[in-house]
Image: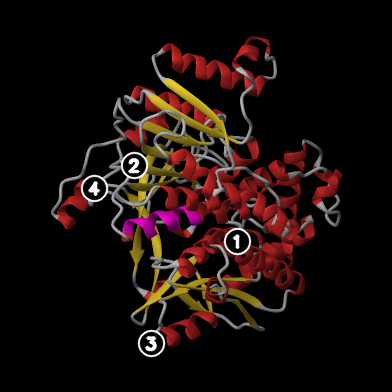
Amino acid sequence: MTGSAVVTSTSDVTDAANVTGVMEMEGTADVTGATDATETGEDIAATATRLAARLAETVRLVGEAGRARLWCVTSSAREPEGPAGLAQTALWGLARVAATEYSEVWGGLVNLPEKPGDDDLSVLIRLLGSRCREDVVAVEHGAASGSRLVPYRPEARERVTGRRPARPGPLCRAGATYLVTGGLGALGLRVAGWLADRGARRLLLLGRTALPARDRWDAVREPVTRRAIDAVRSLEARGVTVRAVAADVGNAAGLARLADPGALGLPPVRGVVHAAGVVDNRLLRAYDEESLRAVMWPKVAGALALHEAFPPGTLDFLVLFSSAGQLLGLPGQASYAAANAFLSGLARYRRAGGDDAVLSLAWTSWHGLGMSASSEVVDAELRARGTADITPAEAFLAWESLVTAGPAGGADLAVLRVLPLTPGILRPPLLRDLAGDPGPPPAPGADEGPDWRTLSGTSLTDLLRGEVRRAVAATLRTDPEAVDVRRPLAEMGVDSLLAVMLRRTLSERLRVGLPMSLLWNRPTVSDITDYLAEQRRSDV
C-alpha cells in the first residue's frame, strides 16, 4: 500500500491572518452554554450528550432555513480545567462533521478562554463576520489559532521538557491485572492478545454480553460468541488468567467494584484500555438525542467511570481508544465523532492534572477490525482526504513506538496513513501541513482533463455539464445520453459509496477540490454544473 502510517500530535497555527477571510453574510447564529447545565448538577456525560443533541438540532434547523451562518462557541474546551469545559469537548468532533455535511451554512467552531478579555471578544466578533478556513479556532490573548497534525517526535518533547521519555509501549507486570473495556469484541480481543505479548498474565475483559457458562462453550455455533470463546481459550493456553465480565462500562458504581482488588480474586488493576463503543451512522438531519446517547454513553460515560475508579497515579497506563474520524469530519459519524472528541478532551484534562499515564489514540480504521473497520464507503472517504486505513500489525507497531508514561509523552495523538498527494484530494485543515509524497507524475500523453478555467458563459456551462454527465455515466456504467441532467442522482442509483467515487472522479478530472457535501446539496447534474460555474465566476 502506498503512503505511510504516522503518529501525529497537534501543533498550533498562531497567525490569525491565516485563519480568516472576509465575506458578506445574511445572518449569524451561535450555540453556546454548557456551564448552565453543569452548575445545575447534571452529570458530565449527560451534559455532553445534551449539548451535542442541541448542536445537531440547531445545525439541521439552520441548514433547512439556509438563511444564516451557524457558529458554535465553546469555553475552555481546548484545555479543560473543570466539568463545564470537559463536557464541551464533545462539540469539537460534532462540529467537524457539521462542517462536512452542512458546509454551505456552517461558519465554524470558536473556543474562548473561561474568562475572555476584550481583545478575545473583538477577535470573536471579527471571526463571526468572516469565512473561516479552519474547522476549529482557539482564541486566547487576543489572537486566533488553528491546529495542525505534525509527526510525533518524543525526542523533541524531551528537549522542551528536559526530561527523558519513559519506556515505549505498555509493558505489563506479571503480578498485576489489566482491564480492557469492549474486551470481548474483535478489537478488544486483539488488544488482549497484544497485552499478553507484553507480559500481562491476568486480564479482565468487559463486554456488554456475558459469555455462556463454560460447560456450554463447545456447543456454541454463533460466530461472534464462538470467536470470543476461542480467543479466551487461546489466552488461557498461554498461561493467562482471563475473567470475562458482562457490565455496563458507564455504570460508575459497578465499575468501581471491579476496580476492587479482591472483587474477582485478582491482583490490583495497573493498566486500562478503553476500547468500548458502538456506532450508529446517520446524517445529522436524521439524528435525535436517543441515538446520540446510545453512541456516546459507552465511550463518554465509560471513560468518566474509569476516570473516577482509577484516579491519576493509580495506573501504569490508561489508553483511550478514539477515532481519527472526529478529526477528518467523516459524514454520518457525528455522534461517534462527538464521543471520540470527548475522549481526547478527557486525556488532556487528566494530563493537565498531572496524570502522565493517560493517552488518547485517535486511530484511523483498522483493516477488518473494530467499529471503524474498513468498508468501501469509509475507505473512499478516507482516500478523498488523503488518508487510508492501517493493518492491525501496523497499529500495534505504532502503539509500541509511543510513550505511554512520563512528562515527555503526548496525551492526545492520532495514528493514520498519509497518502501521496494527487489531484482531487481535499485534506481537512488539520492535515494540511503533513508532508505527503507528491505521487507519481502523469504518464506521457495522459489526458490531464479540460482546461475549463479559461472559459466563461455558455462555453463554460456546456463543458462542465458534459464533464459531470460523463462522470455520472461512468460511475453508473451507462451511456452519457441516458443521464437525465435534472433528475436527482439518488433516484438514478448513486448511493453513498458511488457519491464518494463520483466526487473523487470529478475532483481528479477537473483538478479542483470539491466539498464533501456537494452531492447532498447539489443533487442533480445541472445543480453540480451550476456550482462549478459559480466557483469559476468567484475566481475571476
Going from N to C along the chain, the mark reached first, 2 or 1, is 1
Label 2 environment density (alpha carbons within 10 Å; few <14, some 14–19, many ≥20): many
Label 1 environment density (alpha carbons within 10 Å; few <14, some 14–19, many ≥20): some
* Residue 176 image point, x, y percent: 33, 30
Asked if the residue at tag 4 contacts the one at tag 2, i.e. Cβ–Cβ closer than 8 Å, the answer is no
Real-space CA distance between mark 3 and mark 4, rounded to the nearest whole angstrom: 36 Å
Three-letter amino acid code of the residue under disc 2: Phe
Three-letter amino acid code of the residue under disc 3: Asp
Residue beneath the point at 37% across and 41% down? 6
Whether residue 215 can be seen here: yes
Residue of label 4: 406
Residue of label 2: 317
Q: Nearer the viewer, mark 3 or mark 1?
A: 1
Going from N to C along the chain, the mark reached first, 2 or 4, is 2
Residue of label 3: 119
Three-letter amino acid code of the residue under disc 4: Gly
Q: Which residues are magenta?
A: 342-351
Residue 228 covered by magenta stretch: no
Going from N to C along the chain, the mark reached first, 3 or 4, is 3
The residue tagged with tag 4: helix, strand or loop?
loop
Real-space CA distance between mark 4 and mark 1, rounded to the nearest whole angstrom: 32 Å
Residue 347 covered by magenta stretch: yes
Residue of label 1: 46
Label 3 environment density (alpha carbons within 10 Å; few <14, some 14–19, many ≥20): some
Three-letter amino acid code of the residue under disc 1: Ala
* Residue 479 image point, x, y percent: 81, 39
